[in-house]
Image (cartoon, rainbow, N blue to C red):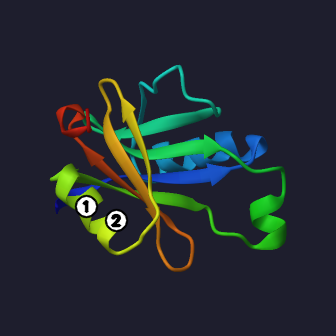
Amino acid sequence: MGIEFIQHVNIRCAPGDLAAIERFYLEVAGLQRGHRPPNLRNQGIWLYVGEKPVVHVTVRCAEGYIQTDHHGSVDHIAFQSYGAAAFAEKLRSMNIAYEQSNVAGAGYQIFIRDPVGTVLEFNFPNNEAPA
């Protein structure tokens, strides 16, 4: 398994935070709002650099959760990857639990957690998904 680059960052927020986060990334960072698949289960937006959706913002928290309890806003880190079979075998050999998903047109995904609970998402081409 090899990593090519970080694909995107997902920021979680409360419903009331979504507009302010969007405004910040559009106005301060210069990102552009773009297409987001309509069948995702949570409300949110995808923000692009050119043709690439590099920041995903997802409504996953109750109002005040992040600010009141000082929880972090980054939900997961995604890596564009190759070598899915070898990576899955490596995880099994190390007894690391993982979840997987094959999203048509988006890729085959393997999800794991780091030692402090941060979710890492490894995205592979759909044709690397197991049969």
Task: From the image, tell me which residue sits under label 2.
Answer: 92
Q: Does the residue at mark 2 contact the one at mark 1 (Cβ under 8 Å)?
A: yes
- Residue 49's quadrant in the figure? top left
- Numbered circle sitting on residue 64: none
In the displayed structure, does residue 83 sit left or right of residue 23?
left
Residue 130 lies, with reference to residue 78, above or below; the image says: above
Neighbourhood count class around disc 2 (C-alpha, 10 Å): few under 14, some 14–19, many 20 upward: few
Question: Which residue is painted at 43% across and 39% down in the image?
Answer: 47
In the displayed structure, does residue 49 sit left or right of residue 56?
left
| Quadrant the N terminus occupies | bottom left
Mark 2 and mark 1: Cα distance apart in space: 5 Å
Mark 2 element type: helix
Tell me the amino acid under the disc marked 2: Arg
Question: Which residue is painted at 84% across and 68% down in the image?
Answer: 68
Residue 75 lies, with reference to residue 23, above or below; the image says: below
Q: Is residue 30 visible?
A: yes
Instruction: Find residue 35 and report its horizontal and vertical position in percent.
Output: 42, 24
Neighbourhood count class around disc 1 (C-alpha, 10 Å): few under 14, some 14–19, many 20 upward: few
Instruction: Find residue 91 and report its horizontal and vertical position in percent.
Output: 33, 66
The image shows a total of numbered marks equal to 2
Task: From the image, tell me which residue sits under label 1.
Answer: 89
Instruction: Find residue 83 and report its horizontal and vertical position in percent.
Output: 15, 53
Question: Which residue is painted at 56% across and 79% down in the image?
Answer: 116
